Every structure is written in C-alpha cells, then in structure tokens.
Image: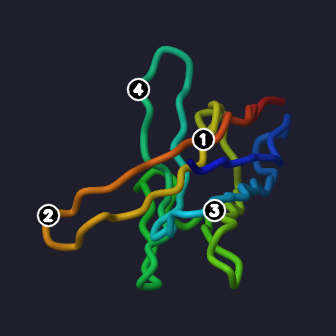
C-alpha cells in the first residue's frame, strides 16, 4: 500500500501564490508518476498537473503558465507551485501516486492523498 500526505493548502487572495506538497511512502511498490487532481464543489475531479518518470510534465489548459509541478530527487515527493491564483482555482486538491505493472498493457495502481483545501478569495 502507498500512503500520501498532503500539505500547503489554505486561503489566498486572487493573484497570490501557494505551494502544495505531497510525500508518498511505499515499502514494496515503485512509483512512476505523481500529480495533482482537484475537485471544486459540484464539479467532477479534474487533472491539474502530472509528472511522469520520463521527465515530462502535463498541465491542464486552465493552469498552464501559472502552475508548476516538480518532484524531489527521490521521486517520491511532488510539489505544485501555484501562482497568479484565481477564484476558479478554489477546490480540494488531491495528489496521487501511480505505478505501472506493465508498459505493454499500461495497467497501473493508483493511490490518493487526503486532499487539501485551496480557497482563492478576496
């Protein structure tokens, strides 16, 4: 099993910044990808950013140019630097860790953090 602990959420004014952190721990599983989803009230969970173990990153169009995802050298901690925050960024943010069983069929396991609230309001 993989455990993920998130931190860094809070209340910020529009235009402000926050940095989210998520540390994953696993004893027997290898982590390939880590990233962030978010869920606003009444909305479906959407992918915000992902960090792939080949070094590539992906961002939702709505956050591109404002958010930056990064990982530590051990590749088991993921960060989300959130700049120029907008009220529509308000959501619960969930980090995830993913490991692939097979590159051939792309099967994978996935675990999620507990969520951290980000509120952007004046």
Q: Which residue is mark 2?
A: 105
Q: Which residue is mark 1?
A: 94
Q: Which residue is mark 4?
A: 44
Q: Secondary structure at mark 2?
A: loop
> Residue 41 sits in which quadrant?
top right
Q: Residue at x 61, y 62 (%)?
A: 67
Q: Secondary structure at mark 1?
A: strand
Depth order, front residue of 45/97: 97
Q: Which residue is mark 3?
A: 27
Residues packed near mark 3 inside 10 Å, few (<14), some (14 to 19) or many (20 plus): few
Q: Residue at x 71, y 78 (%)?
A: 72
Q: Residue furthest top?
A: 42
* Percent coordinates x, y for residue 84 in the rendering: 70, 55
Q: Nearer the viewer, mark 3 or mark 4?
A: 3
Residue 76 falls left or right of residue 100: right
The answer for how far apart the CA atoms under marks 2 and 1 are is 26 Å
The answer for how far apart the CA atoms under marks 1 and 3 are is 21 Å
């Amino acid at each position: 099993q993989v455990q993920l602990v998130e931190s860094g959420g809070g209340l910020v004014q529009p235009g402000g910044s926050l940095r989210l952190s998520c540390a994953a721990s696993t004893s027997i599983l290898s982590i390939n990808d880590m990233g962030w989803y978010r869920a606003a009230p009444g909305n479906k969970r959407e992918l915000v950013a992902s960090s792939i173990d080949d070094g590539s990153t992906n961002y939702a169009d709505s956050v591109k140019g404002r958010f930056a995802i990064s990982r530590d050298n051990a590749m088991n901690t993921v960060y989300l630097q959130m700049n120029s925050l907008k009220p529509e960024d308000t959501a619960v943010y969930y980090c995830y860790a993913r490991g692939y069983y097979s590159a051939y069929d792309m099967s994978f396991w996935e675990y999620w953090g507990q969520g951290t609230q980000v509120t952007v309001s004046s």
